[in-house]
Image: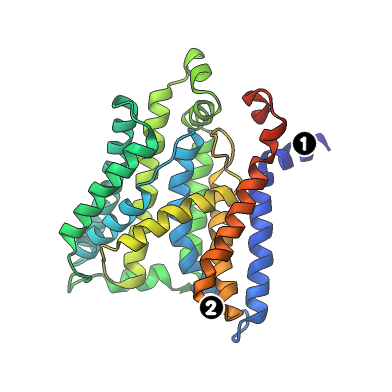
Amino acid sequence: MKEWKYFFAQHRGALAAALLFFVMFTIYAVNHPAGLTPNVVQTAANKGVLLALVAIGQTFVVLTAGIDLSVGMVFVLCNCVASYVVAGSPTMVAFGIAAVLATGLFCGAANGAIVIFGRLQPIVATIASGAVYFGLALWLRRSPGASPKFSSDLADVMTGKVLGIVPSSGIFLAAIVLCVWIPFRRSPLGRAVYATGSSESAAYMSGVPVKRAKFAAYMFSGFFSALGGLFLTFFTYSGEASSANGSTYTLYSIAAVVLGGVSLFGGRGSAIGAVFGALAFRAIGDLLFVFDVDPLWQPLFQGTVLLLAVSVGSARLLGVRNKLELFS
């Protein structure tokens, strides 16, 4: 019984986000004109996976008690890069995908170096670097488009359905969580990230490699933002240096992290919660669409949900005298 209580206490944010998503998606599917069909699930998964990937990247940084306001611009930059290099023969496509992911890793490494060695506040450093990444995206793609030899076959596979039922993007997202997040969470580096977010000074005094943990967090953030940009290219068959997309995905990634139960104070939460938070946040827009709510009202509803989530997540702070009580 105590194990169940401990499990619930540790994962209540993720469980609440999962419950919220399933309730909202059920209401959406019941009221959708086509019902719960494979095509409806595929469309929802394809939209959700974009935000989920960026939210996973944001989670790594937030766990260190930081924040990455450049994730949306890295997302847009990698979308533009992918529109050029994911083209040609299978070998060239493989190298192109590697180049896109390397771009994300480089952006994350640059952010980490600025924050750690430049000793700048993450919010300031990543706003500045995000502007640079968007400038590079504009230089690459002054107008939307893609290479004439863009690999549309691969795009169709990654955004289609397996056996005509299960969305490929959903399978990919689940595989990422199983193969990347869970091993990371249980690794020494993962524990160092959590320790750094819980109390950086205490972690340093205990011999935890704080700089390595923070640097890895920013690199993971860049990597997953690049994955999101790659999938955006698969969905749209093109790249676009869109400031609106960059700003929207940055804001929504923070919303997804909060909805998923990840503490903005660091050291608590998981990428699984952020994934369900992203899916739940996307489901809000789907519900408003199904019920034919004026699009001008959508930001109001989304902002209200986000405000409630932040308020609930911060309620414990009212009775906390010592920050370490949050992690007990």
Residue 123 placed where, x, y %?
A: 39, 39
The three-letter amino acid code for the residue at tag 1 is Glu
Quadrant housing residue 33: bottom right
- Label 2: which secondary element: loop
Residue 189 higher or lower than 255, as above or below: above
Q: Residue furthest top?
A: 205
Q: Is residue 33 above or below residue 192?
A: below
**Label ID, residue 3:** 1
Image quadrant holding the N terminus, namely top right
How far apart are the two marked residues, 2 and 1, measured between alpha carbons?
46 Å
Residue 282: x %, y % from top left: 53, 65
Who is closer to the viewer here, 312 or 176? 312
Q: Is residue 144 left or right of residue 177?
A: left
The nearer-to-camera label among 2 and 1 is 2
Extreme residue toward the right, this view: 1
Residue 77, quarter of picture: bottom left
- Name the mark on residue 294: 2
Work out whether mark 2 precedes mark 1 in sequence or the reverse, and give the earlier one.
1
